[in-house]
Image (cartoon, rainbow, N blue to C red):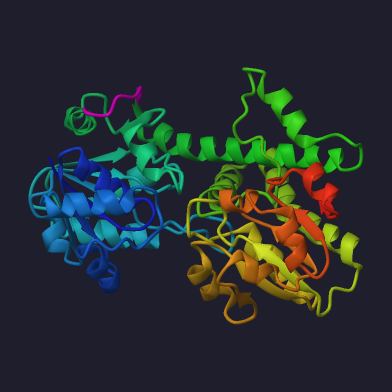
């Protein structure tokens, strides 16, 4: 099938290379000319497992194309996916201006029946809005489909090709889009849920909000464990063995971040409010998450004293999670900003995210070339991202490099007994 993807960010680029790898002819559009130039040369613009290989493979075989021209993207396309950003506004609502701009650009170029698929996370009712907007510019037939993405950064390729489920929301049960979308996903073996537009749009928000709730809940339990000699890892394991609960997302730490959970939880809270409903649980989830990074600062002060002025603090990790270079809403960035306000000197290392972090933090911190460089002469180490190489550090080597043996393990990566035996003052989250 001939497919176009509008937007080549963390979602659109992954969807594009995967659909091309399934044998479809895919054209990806982005208005960023520099990004498109790099992608045409098979140079990934984001860090994602398996992306470089699939990008090169499908460009070489002629199944994947990149353009900045809407005429090229819309012409002959049977299905057009919208994967543009829907960032959070200052008031917490989802910003839909980029989606609307893309819809208008598509509508002005439509010449035949086309299926318009929304991959972006959008408020309930966006599907109907999309139809009304396109209809202002195009009088022919078309279909709107909601197909929310459930791809995690760092594992987006595998998540697309081997998903837990495929959710498809249609305007009508007998829409011709049903047959087309089933054909598009025919090679992917996964349960499918076919529903209406509004339910599909709500499913995405509900899923992310529930997962964020699990994270905030386990962080609250961890904060209680801190004062009661209980180990949150054992508590989470015991909870997760209950099949009604499950072990996933019961991981205490600095809280959730990234481009999805913060904005989606906030957007759903706002959607509820707009409908006259006070979503008390999500309000608590949001507040708990905001305060979680403050627990780390409290632990730093516990080890170094309340005045952190001129103390050198090493930070392991800048990305919001391992496996990505994305620093949007990263708890690590929040911790660093708090440390800087207290006058601390920060030196940070991340294997992938330093370039993106510098766009936010500028030269207010030092960016280390290696883990060893970050540790050298530091008075405390904060582990802020769960990169696996951080878990493999040698206690003896770390102690030799640091000025003072203080570790705040914000991701509970390390073995507390091992580091305490080596002479470290070790503080985890709920340990």
Apparent side of residue 237 relative to residue 163 in the rendered image (left or right): right
* Residue at 60% over, 59% down: 330
Apparent side of residue 377 relative to residue 40 in the rendered image (left or right): right
Q: Find out whether residue 191 is within the magenta segment.
A: yes
Apparent side of residue 231 relative to residue 167 in the rendered image (left or right): right
**Residue 167, quarter of picture:** top left
Q: Image height check: is 394 above or below 239? A: below
Q: Taking the image as drawn, is residue 291 in sight?
A: no
Residue 128 position within the rendered picture, expressed as x and y whole percent measured from the top left? 34, 43
Name the quadrant of the N terminus.
top left
Q: Taking the image as drawn, is residue 91 in sight?
A: yes
Apparent side of residue 414 relative to residue 96 in the rendered image (left or right): right
Residue 301 position within the rendered picture, expressed as x and y whole percent measured from the top left? 87, 64
Q: Image height check: is 161 above or below 9? A: above
Read off the magenta span: 186-193
* Residue at 63% over, 71% down: 373
Is residue 180 or residue 361 the one in the foreground?
Answer: 361
Is residue 132 or residue 57 the one in the foreground?
Answer: 57
* Residue at 15% over, 41% down: 24
Q: Image height check: is 377 above or below 325? A: below
Q: Find out whether residue 42 is within the magenta segment.
A: no
Name the quadrant of the C terminus.
top right
* Residue at 25% over, 53% down: 55
Residue 179 position within the rendered picture, expressed as x and y whole percent measured from the top left? 18, 27
- Report the predominant secondary structure element of the magenta stretch: loop
């Amino acid at each position: 099938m001939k497919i176009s993807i509008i937007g080549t960010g963390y979602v659109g680029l992954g969807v594009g290379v995967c659909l091309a790898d399934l044998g479809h002819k895919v054209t990806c559009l982005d208005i960023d000319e520099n990004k498109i130039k790099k992608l045409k040369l098979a140079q990934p613009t984001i860090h994602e497992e398996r992306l470089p290989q699939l990008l090169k493979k499908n460009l070489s075989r002629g199944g994947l194309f990149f353009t900045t021209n809407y005429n090229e993207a819309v012409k002959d396309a049977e299905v057009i996916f919208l994967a543009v950003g829907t960032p959070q506004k200052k008031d917490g609502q989802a910003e839909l201006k980029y989606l609307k701009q893309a819809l208008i650009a598509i509508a002005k170029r439509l010449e035949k029946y086309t299926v318009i698929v929304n991959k972006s996370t959008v408020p309930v009712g966006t599907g109907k809005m999309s139809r009304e907007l396109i209809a202002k510019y195009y009088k022919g037939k078309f279909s709107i489909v909601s197909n929310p993405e459930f791809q995690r950064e760092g594992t987006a390729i595998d998540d697309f090709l081997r998903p837990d489920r495929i959710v498809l929301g249609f305007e009508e049960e007998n829409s011709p889009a049903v047959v087309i979308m089933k054909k598009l996903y025919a090679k992917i073996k996964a349960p499918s849920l076919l529903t209406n537009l509004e339910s599909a749009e709500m499913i995405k928000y509900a899923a992310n909000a529930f997962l964020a709730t699990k994270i905030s809940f386990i962080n609250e339990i961890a904060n209680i464990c801190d004062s009661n000699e209980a180990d949150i890892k054992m508590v989470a394991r015991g909870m997760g063995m209950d099949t009604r609960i499950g072990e996933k997302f019961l991981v205490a730490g600095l809280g959730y971040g990234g481009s999805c959970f913060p904005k989606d939880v906030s957007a759903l809270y706002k959607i509820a409010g707009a409908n006259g409903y006070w979503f008390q649980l999500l309000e608590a989830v949001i507040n708990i998450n905001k305060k979680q990074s403050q627990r780390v600062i409290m632990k730093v002060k516990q080890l170094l004293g309340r005045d952190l002025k001129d103390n050198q603090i090493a930070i392991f990790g800048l990305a919001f999670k391992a496996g990505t270079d994305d620093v949007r809403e990263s708890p690590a960035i929040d911790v660093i900003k708090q440390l800087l306000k207290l006058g601390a000197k920060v030196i940070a290392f991340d294997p992938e995210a330093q370039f993106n972090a510098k766009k936010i933090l500028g030269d207010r911190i030092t960016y280390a070339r290696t883990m060893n460089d970050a540790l050298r002469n530091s008075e405390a180490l904060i582990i802020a991202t769960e990169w696996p190489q951080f878990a493999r550090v040698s206690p003896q080597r770390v102690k030799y490099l640091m000025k003072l043996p203080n570790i705040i393990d914000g991701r509970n990566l390390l073995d507390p007994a091992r580091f305490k035996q080596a002479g470290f003052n070790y503080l985890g989250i709920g340990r």
